[in-house]
Amino acid sequence: MGSGSSSGMEGGCACGGVRYLLTSAPMFVHCCHCTWCQRETGSAFALNALIESACVKVLRGAPEAVPTPSASGGGQQIVRCPDCRVAVWSHYSGAGDALCFVRVGTLDAPETCPPDIHIFTSTKQPWVGIPAGAPAVEEYYRREDYWTAESLERRAAV
């Protein structure tokens, strides 16, 4: 869906050592409530903006990929600032390095990327409310059921 309405969105880590620019709006934004995301973030969910890696331009620093286990068993690379260790994005085994799952909270304006869907709600914390009418699924979903045609084309291209 590409909730980020404007291109040129910037973000970075907590210490400012890593800064990046999204040169396109994200294809889709997940709010993932799985227990793995809860553990990795130390929070109730992860909010990830899916975007082509070619659309993420590092402006400052040298972010470092840290191999991390995943529920699928395929693992993921969590890309972090080498100094403050804040996670700025991930690469999951399914899409490899071609697709970034940008941590929305690291954007300078995270409000520009609200979730397009809530996933793995079967394991969400009971005190987390999902807005009425927001797309939500108990586990995962078929992209064709929720993504726009433009986002599907962009995803197919990577």
Image (cartoon, helix red, strand yellow):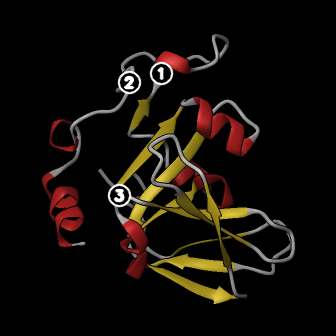
Give percent across and percent down for residue 65.
63, 73
Residue identifier under label 3: 94
Q: Nearer the viewer, mark 3 or mark 1?
A: 3
Q: Is residue 104 visible?
A: yes
The residue carrying mark 1 is 121
Please, what secondary structure does the residue beneath circle 3 have? loop
Residue extending furthest toward the front: 73
Q: Secondary structure at mark 1?
A: helix
Residue drawn 49% across and 43% down? 114
Looking at the image, residue 155 lies above or below residue 62: above
- Amino acid carrying label 2: it is Ala
Name the residue at 86% across, 69% down.
Answer: 84
Determine contact: label 2, label 1, CB under 8 Å: yes
Left or right of 135? Residue 8 is right
Residue 110 vs residue 127, the one in the foreground = 127
Classify mark 3: residues with Cα within 10 Å, few (<14), some (14-19) or many (20+): few
Residue placed most toward the observer, 23 or 139: 139
Between marks 3 and 2 in the image, the one whose residue lies nearer the viewer: 3
The residue under label 2 is: 136
Q: Is residue 155 left or right of residue 51?
A: left
Farthest top residue? Answer: 126
Label 3 vs label 2: CA separation?
22 Å
Q: Disc 3 and disc 1: Cα gap in Å?
A: 21 Å
Q: Residue at x 33, y 58 (%)?
A: 27
Type of the residue with mark 3: Gly
